[in-house]
Image (cartoon, rainbow, N blue to C red):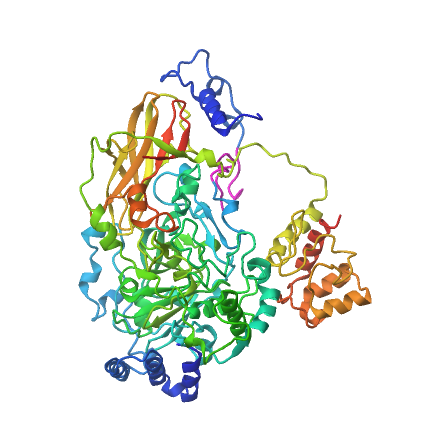
Amino acid sequence: MAGLTRRRMLGGAAAATGGLLSSKAEARSPDPLITELQDWASQTGDGVDATPYGLPIEYERDVIRRNVPWLTADTISSVNFTPIHALDGTITPQGCAFERHHSGAIALRKQDYRLLINGLVENPIVLTYGDIERFPRETHVYFCECAANTGMEWAGAQLNGVQFTHGMLHNMEYTGVPLRVLLAEAGADMSDQNWLYIEGADASSNGRSLPMAKALDDCLVAFKANGEALRKEHGYPVRLVVPGWEGNLWVKWLRRIEVVAEAVESREETSKYTDLLANGTARKWSWVMDAKAVITSPSPQAPIFHGYGPLVISGLAWSGHGRITRVDVSLDGGVSWEIARLGYRGSDKALTRFYHDIHWNGNEMLLQARAIDETGYVQPTKSQLRAVRGENSIYHNNGVQTWYVDSQGVVENVEIT
Amino acid sequence: MSRLPNLFVLALGITTLLLGVAYGVATRYQMAAERQVMLQQVAAVRPQFDEAKSIDEVPTTTNLADAEDIGSENRIATDRDAKASVPAPNSLRRLGIGRPALPAEIAAWDVDIMPDGHGLPEGRGDVETGEAIFSDYCASCHGDFAEGVDNWPVLAGGFDTLAEDNPIKTIGSYWPHLSTVWDYIQRSMPFGSAQTLDEDQVYAIVAYLLYSNDLVDESFALSHENFADILMPNVAGFVVDDRAETEYALWRKKPCMQNCKESVNITMRASDLDVTPEPIRLETSTTHSDGEVSDKDIVKNGQKVFKKCQTCHQVGAQAKHRVGPHLNKIFGRVIGGLEDFRYSQVFDVAAKEGQIWDEESMAAFLLEPRTYFQGTKMAFSGLRTADEIAGVIAYLKTYSD
């Protein structure tokens, strides 16, 4: 295999698997999978309890979170990426939802969990995990996107896989107590000009300032995701959910909420998570994740194996401003666009799944998708973004992504004019 | 809240906790007099905290939505968000869940520092002291001169680079407030031993970082008294998010659908850079059963436990000294015996006496490091169980050849 590029290998794989030249497969001899008795049709399988808590079948073990080792100095203060190239629908399974830690994922037992609410409150209170489950709760689906998602692409096409370019993203159904309910319990001064300082229990002590209006609007103090307890790596037993806003605000292992009169200007809202512009000044408090769409398949990790003919183009769209109302798809790098079908219409600040069904005749394609949300925001191109911000922002890159598909079905991350 | 007001609250005593908090907070933030009055009025008309759990205050009905002060409109999901649950009842009354926080608890966790320095404890540290502490606890990642090692953050220099192609964002060139430096170091550093530095040590490290950024001279000492005098160079370098004006206005327009550009050219390909992790291949793994499962499990467990150690100690072919020395071939090694590592004094003494690391000494050390070698700089408080200790020893032995 030495000397073969990954590109050729994938092309070869596509040719071997798919029978590229014909759009219809014709059987020359009977398929033994049908005509011969298979073990699984004769012998028994696993009994119940073979996996008391199940993992995906071994044939799916490549559908996992991956990290990019050269990005960070070690894995403890680092990030990995959701395998969105291999998922469909909108809900992200917890087990493969991206992780971002600043001092590693800690193991905090429910019985050791305490939440302190203090500051500009009449009654500073301490809540246990059990206490939190006694407040009225709500259930909502929301996406969580790291502000640095797609951050490696500011200067051009860099990572060849949607998992790596767009995988700091997950979408779960959260159950939790509205933050406003807990603030009321502490008798918080809920004046508009006040802020909350939100702090985690891990060694990074990640802390962020949150304006009161957002806290009273839709934030949740969540203890369940997709119906079960949060995973350790997502802040078990309690994390903050800040719908539509950058993931760093979704403080994990939430231990303290302080009502303050001004922003704390902590490390994570000054040194990090601020967006450097071309003129050397930086935006701060850029919390909202703007509308964004990306085609998850075909994509570099999900090339076209099946040859010519019917092709499902599938992707995700989301907006921190609210609901996705439309997704457009281009096959020619943005010269012309068609309106895609919303296969699963997401709710407010949640992922929407879109599909675009085409007949592929082997022509090269430059695939793009652009999201439009309920505020009329149209996802910009990378050039439009760079014209305003330059290339050093790191965060909040929601420019339109381009995938080049060659005549063999191999897909590559490219930049275009 | 911060340490100083908390002490004040403590002095007032718990019976006047409510008023104390309101007053302390008002003092700290220098709130307008009207707001202070308002807050105290609110406190006065609210039921006393101690009484909050009385039966009158806790809704007796099990259906909270039926409580009189809950708007019935709360029970109807809006069309806009038909999938969401009906909003939780938004009671104006307290439910009486939880307990009052004690002043000592608030003081223990509420240690954040505001941009104007509020919340800083009393203390003092100079550049020279800071340099020594930095060298011991910080330099393995950030470099002796705060220049950064490997991918760890660069803390010094980078002035006038923010508008260049490769901006260097350091404490000196980028951070707007000195309070952030103090706050972050006291709560989140050193990496792997957070919150183990005392106030004077933090002041000293911050003083050294100012020095390494050429912002003070070598005789400088930083304290709570002169803290507010230090202005960071990039304090005016930030604007509040202005996307609504600079971007949304441009992009909230009807999008083009046909003939949107004349031509399209590929200008860059990710494969040219070739920095993407390799794909995972689904080969079946060969499994061995050689009857040594239990030993392997001990090593495997030890490898897991060793995660507690590995922010400071490395093993393996690439192992280097970090905050602690590398642990390759540790058994049989003279304790404190590596010449290129700066040990705590107590280890230098052990080295002179020719003490050797063996399983026994390692087990005793891992159980109670600071008892076994009194005065060790190692911040780790010890492993909890014999299994953990046996595991780590077995794991380290795999790096002993």
Report the magenta stretch's main SS: loop
Residue A279, compared with residue A267, is above or below; it is above
Kindly identify the residue that appears in the image at 42 percent across and 18 percent down: A19
Kindly identify the residue that appears in the image at 19 percent across and 66 percent down: B71
In reply to whether residue A46 is colored magenta, the answer given is: yes
Q: Nearer the viewer, residue B276 or B298?
A: B276
Residue A312, percent from left and from top: 33, 30
Residue B137, compared with residue A139, is above or below; it is below
Residue B398, percent from left and from top: 71, 49
Q: In this image, B262 relative to B222: left or right?
A: left
Q: Which residues are magenta?
A: A45-63
Q: In this image, B314 relative to A319: left or right?
A: right
- Which quadrant holds residue B66? bottom left
In reply to whether residue B331 is colored magenta, the answer given is: no
Residue reaching furthest to the right: B354
Whether residue B74 is visible here, answered yes or no, is yes
Whether residue B82 is visible here, answered yes or no, is no
Q: In this image, B262 relative to B376: left or right?
A: left
